[in-house]
Image (cartoon, rainbow, N blue to C red):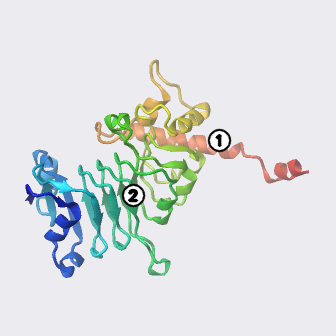
């Protein structure tokens, strides 16, 4: 469905107009919002051809500020996609059934995450894609609340946005997500996550990108330097640790799974070596005295 209008309305008003009653909202399980230009791509035409609640937003549809969306009444929502809009705030606090969240290439600064009741069972979120937004600085601890996660893309891969000072400002340590043992894909490109490689959950990991994407002061550069000192790998002439860390970044090219597997195996070896070099409890007791 192509949406267009010459009268400025808020994003929330547009959403409400498509699902006017409370029952309408509560019945929505899948919702996908794309720019109209995506119809030019065969992938989107085929993938979403028979999927309910797919909207293509025309450039002629003018949204007024604020660019906020509140999904509090969409309590059955399982999959949400919003791509290529100017969205800055997203309220998902009531979306306890959400399994897939894909909101890349917006201007998101704030997300209110689902408020799960521990007695109701484990959170259902398995996939989170936040690439190329403008999220405010905080550590990764929020993601530890979603132990079923298999894909977590939270970096910034758009160098043009980075030059405009638009990038996701995650910081701190990978230790905050050490409990995500089901994680298969992780992207923290250009973030300020600067430590904790030894705690990266690699048991099921097949894809990991942590390049600086031209952002020279990115915290991930410290991750790269720490790894390089103990990495069992020789770099080719002209190749850098950042090239290696960036390799496999979506969607700039076809994913090379062989190279990704090599990267993850080398990180596992690095982690094993790090563990071997840890002081024993006996040594610690000696140092105490």
Q: Secondary structure at mark 1?
A: helix
Residue occupying the point 34% across, 72% down: 95
Q: Nearer the viewer, residue 215 or 148?
A: 215
Badge 1, how many Cα within 10 Å: few under 14, some, many 20+? some
In the current view of this chain or complex, which residue is farthest to the top? 237
Q: Position of residue 12 (x, y in %)?
A: 23, 65
Q: Nearer the viewer, residue 14 or 93?
A: 14
Circle number at residue 140: none
Q: Nearer the viewer, residue 18 or 210?
A: 18
Q: Does any portion of residue 41 appear in the rendered image?
A: yes
- Image-based side of 188 in relation to 277, left or right: left
Residue at numbered disc 1: 273
Residue occupying the point 88% across, 49% down: 286
Residue at numbered disc 2: 110
Badge 2, how many Cα within 10 Å: few under 14, some, many 20+? some
Place residue 176 in its image quadrant: bottom right
């Amino acid at each position: 469905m192509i949406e267009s209008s010459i009268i400025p309305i808020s994003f929330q008003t547009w959403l409400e107009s498509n699902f006017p009653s409370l029952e309408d909202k509560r019945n929505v399980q899948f919702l996908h919002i794309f720019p109209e230009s995506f119809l030019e791509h065969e992938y989107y035409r085929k993938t979403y051809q028979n999927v309910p609640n797919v909207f293509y937003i025309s450039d002629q549809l003018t949204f007024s500020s604020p660019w906020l969306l509140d999904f509090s009444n969409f309590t059955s929502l399982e999959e949400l996609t919003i791509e290529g809009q100017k969205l800055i705030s997203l309220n998902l606090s009531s979306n306890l059934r959400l399994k897939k969240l894909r909101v890349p290439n917006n201007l998101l600064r704030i997300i209110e995450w689902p408020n799960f009741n521990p007695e109701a069972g484990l959170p259902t979120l398995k996939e989170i894609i936040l690439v190329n937004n403008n999220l405010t600085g905080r550590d990764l601890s929020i993601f530890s609340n979603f132990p079923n996660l298999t894909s977590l893309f939270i970096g910034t891969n758009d160098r043009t946005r980075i030059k405009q000072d638009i990038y996701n400002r995650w910081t701190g340590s990978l230790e905050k997500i050490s409990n995500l043992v089901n994680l298969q894909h992780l992207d923290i490109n250009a973030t300020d996550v600067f430590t904790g490689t030894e705690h990266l959950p690699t048991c099921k990991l097949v894809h990991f990108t942590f390049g600086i994407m031209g952002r020279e002061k990115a915290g991930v550069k410290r991750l790269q330097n720490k790894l390089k000192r103990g990495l069992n790998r020789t770099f080719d002439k002209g190749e850098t640790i950042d090239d290696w860390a960036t390799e496999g970044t979506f969607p700039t090219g076809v994913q090379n799974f062989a190279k990704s597997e090599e990267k993850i195996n080398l990180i596992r070896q690095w982690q094993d070596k790090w563990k071997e070099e840890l002081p024993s409890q006996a040594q610690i007791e000696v140092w105490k005295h």
